[in-house]
Amino acid sequence: MALNKIRQFLSDQDEKEIVQAITQAEKNTSGEIRVHIETSSKDEPMERAQKVFHNLNMHQTKDRNAVLFYICLTNKAFVILGDEGIHQKVQQEDFWNGTRELVVNHFKQGLYKQGLIYGILKAGSKLKVYFPTTDNNTNELSNEISKA
């Protein structure tokens, strides 16, 4: 049932394009981007996003510069959460407001894939400013979408 609901939200092809966007966004930054989609949660969205962030070991990147795009379908919740390395360099909320607004505006039109892709690419360009890619840049986290 849960995967069917996620399938209605994003097709297999949509997911492939989102993973490609993550790969593209990470080419110019040492930052890491993940997308997590779940059907429901009893937790408040920010609290749940923080748990998912931890469960995906996103807090263990070398520069603490991982970003989570968290989506809860039943609750219609969307959170962008960045790690403390980002927070130390920028005001967390202000840094992500424009990106969040871009994604949410697309979601309101039913353009879920496009919203995520645009948001991911925008996040990558913002991360590039503070965390440019290095010669020894490695992909520390999976680019695949996690689901629950």
Image (cartoon, grey):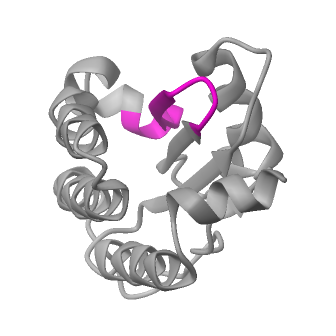
Q: Is residue 31 above or below residue 100?
A: below
On the image, the x and y values in percent for residue 129 come to 16, 55
Which residue does the image show at 59% across and 37% down from the upper left? 73
Examine the structure image and report whether residue 76 is included in the region drawn in magenta: yes
On the image, the x and y values in percent for residue 81 come to 48, 34
Q: Is residue 41 above or below residue 104?
A: above
Q: Nearer the viewer, residue 78 or 39?
A: 39
Q: Is residue 71 above or below residue 97?
A: below
On the image, the x and y values in percent for residue 71 come to 55, 40
Examine the structure image and report whether residue 48 is included in the region drawn in magenta: no
Quarter location, residue 48: top right
Q: Is residue 82 left or right of residue 95?
A: right
On the image, the x and y values in percent for residue 124 come to 27, 61
Q: Is residue 127 left or right of residue 68?
A: left
Q: Is residue 9 left or right of residue 146?
A: left
Which residue does the image show at 64% across and 30% down from the upper left? 74
**In this picture, which residue range is highlighted in magenta?**
72-86
Q: Is residue 77 left or right of residue 109?
A: right
Quarter location, residue 125: bottom left
Q: Nearer the viewer, residue 108 or 58?
A: 108
Which residue does the image show at 42% across and 73% down from the upper left? 18
Disc tally is 0
